[in-house]
Image: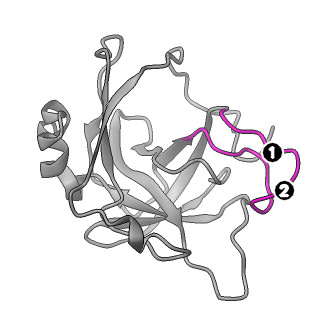
Amino acid sequence: MGFGLVENDPPMPANVRRQVVEVVRHPSYDPSTESGDVGSPFDIAVLRLAEPVTDREPAAIGSASLSCEHRYVGYGRSTEGGMFALHTTWGERKSTKTCVRSQSEQELVIRGVDGGTCWGDSGGPLMIEGKNGIVAVMSRFQPLSPMEWYECKDKNTMIMIRVDAHRDFIASAFAPRAASRP
């Protein structure tokens, strides 16, 4: 089992690639704020697909709790180490049970329980464990001390953007059904 890949990953429908025809970024997102350990609380976008997804129920926007009842899903790197470590694999689905450690009006801080997140996982969902509810999307790693460099490791700490804080933006950007559900 590689870094972040867990044996108790819930069963999922077969992966199907979909063509993205439009990316709608949050109107308040400013990419110039993204440097090092500083980020934007508006680091969220809605992707419009060429064809509708009809073989599964869309996830509802949910609210996170300060608990370990969440699961992160990503397709980023699945080997431990720094940005340029050898034996790096990408693109394989991984799922990590995680804890919400703290939250603000627009962000959550999470820490892995049975794995970690890494380069390439940004934008992936934080789900409510055992339910079809999305509470946040991956933004960046938690700020480290000036002497530390971010490395992928088990139980690392990341910052997520809360989707419930951006319900109006999501509804206005082609996803009104997701925003209207509890």
Tell me which segment is drawn in magenta.
74-91
**Direction right: furthest residue:** 86
Residue behind mark 1: 88
Residue at x 17%, y 33% (from the top left corner): 174
Residue at x 62%, y 80% (from the top left corner): 144
Please, what secondary structure does the residue beneath circle 2 have? loop
**Quadrant position of residue 160:** bottom left
The image position of residue 139, as x and y in percent, is 46, 59
Please, what secondary structure does the residue beneath circle 1 have? loop
Residue 87 placement, left or right of 7: right
Q: CA distance from mark 1 to mark 2?
A: 7 Å
* Residue 27 magenta-highlighted: no
Q: Choose between 45 and 60: the one closer to the eye.
A: 45
**What amino acid is at disc 1?**
Thr
Quarter of the picture containing the C terminus is top left
The image position of residue 132, as x and y in percent, is 35, 33
The residue carrying pointer 1 sits among few (fewer than 14), some (14 to 19) or many (20 or more) residues within 10 Å by Cα, namely: few
The residue carrying pointer 2 sits among few (fewer than 14), some (14 to 19) or many (20 or more) residues within 10 Å by Cα, namely: few
Look at the numbered discs 1 and 2 and tell me whether their residues touch, using CB distance below 8 Å: yes
Residue 135 higher or lower than 149, as above or below: above
Residue behind mark 2: 85
Q: Main SS of the magenta segment?
A: loop
**Direction top: furthest residue:** 55
Residue 167 higher or lower than 10, as above or below: below
Residue 78 placement, left or right of 164: right
Quarter of the picture containing the N terminus is top right
**What amino acid is at disc 2?**
Ala
The image position of residue 36, as x and y in percent, is 56, 75
**Quadrant position of residue 156:** bottom right
The image position of residue 133, as x and y in percent, is 32, 39
**Direction bottom: furthest residue:** 146
Residue 80 higher or lower than 46, as above or below: below
